[in-house]
Amino acid sequence: MKTIGIIVPCYNEAAVLPLFYKETSAVMDALADTYQTEFIFVDDGSADDTLRKITELALTDARVKYISFSRNFGKEAAMLAGMEYAVKHDFICIIDADLQHSPEIIPQMLSYVDRQGYDVAASRRADREGEAKFKSFLSGGFYKVINRISETKISDSAQDFRVMKKDVVKAILAMPEHNRFSKGIFSWVGFNVKWISHENRERAAGETKWSLTGLLKYAIDGILGFTFAPLKLTFWCAGLSLLAAVVSLLYGVIKNIAVADYELLLPLILAAVFSLGALILLCIGILGEYLARTYTEVKNRPKYIIAKTNTNVTYFTSEGE
Ligand code: UDP
Ligand code: MG
């Protein structure tokens, strides 16, 4: 019998978890003759009753495993912990806890990877309905920018909801970075992907964890993690200032500096000094962002810390004890 691990990152999802479990386990029960299911709930440092809800489920259903973090490490870390544990399965599914991802299509995804030669079956959202206008405008702009400047193509509509073969997950786990941007990572590893159109459902209960600043940070992580294009801005700035210098020099020679009215020129000179300062600081800032990320990678701290689990994972990183 083939096995599938279903990874569910959960952060303050107590309100929706019982419903999620009910719907998803019903879907998986129908497949019980062919696939043996294990649920891996990753409690990402929830402040509500999430962990209690999961442990209650684990009492009545031996298929339910949980990994609970010592604090909130973010969805990326939660998915990573789930994959590190679930890579023993033939197939690995990642799905949100809030029922925005319909568990009903898991069987279809499974059939694509198990019987139709695909390595991954991933959901792609058909529309951005149910999402704030401003948010979809911003994310639309972000994907345009990142796809222009990055070699890794990142789809606007791709979701984390997917079923993958074990080998794909092994490839993902071979990417050791701390600044994880899963949309980039999923795309970077490649493989044969079947895209499934999926209507965005309303959240069944609870609320979204994404704030505007959170999304912005995520977008910057995505850009800095998958392209060095911003660094090239330095060269553009250098070229621009060089050009300005040559133009001013020529202007000075032609007009003959001697007759120049310095009082009139002063604001211009100030403007030139300040804009040059701004460009230099911008370039240093970009450099700093890459350096800071390099620093986090070098420090090599654990990507998450497990405080409680009913799995055999005894230590908080994949490296072992
Ligand atoms: N999530 C998580 N850690 C976080 C934020 C979110 O594990 O720090 C989980 C959350 O519980 C949910 C999924 O990631 O299962 C998607 O989060 P959410 O629904 O808030 O995002 P949205 O669907 O609004 O993009
Ligand atoms: Mg959601």
Image (cartoon, rainbow, N blue to C red):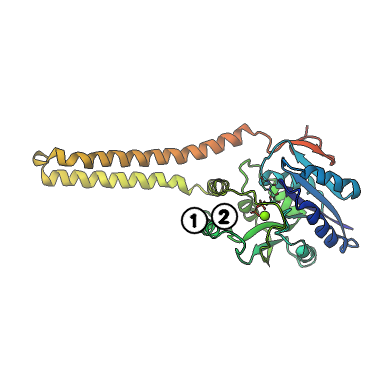
Question: Residues under labels 2 and 1: Cα distance?
Answer: 12 Å
Residue 268's x, y, as percent?
Answer: 22, 42
Judge by depth and name the residue closer to the eye, 177 or 289: 289
Write down the residue under mark 1.
145
- Give the answer, above or below, for where 296 lies relative to 160: above
Residue 283 visible in the displayed image: yes
- Give the answer, above or below, for where 146 lies relative to 278: below
- Give the answer, above or below, for where 289 lies relative to 91: above
Q: Earlier in the sequence, mark 2 or mark 1?
A: 1
Image check: 211 left or right of 109? left
**Mark 1 Cα shell of 10 Å, populated few (<14), some (14-19), many (≥20):** few
Mark 2 sits near ligand 1, with its Cβ under 8 Å away? no
Q: Quadrant of residue 267?
A: top left
Q: Residue furthest left?
A: 259
Residue 41's x, y, as percent?
Answer: 78, 47
Q: Give the numbered dot on residue 277.
A: none
Q: Residue at x 81, y 55 (%)?
A: 21
Residue 91 visible in the displayed image: no
Q: Quadrant of residue 200?
A: bottom right
Secondary structure type for disc 1 = helix
What residue type is disc 2 on? Answer: Thr
Judge by depth and name the residue closer to the eye, 213 or 88: 213
Write down the residue under mark 2.
152
Q: Residue at x 81, y 58 (%)?
A: 24
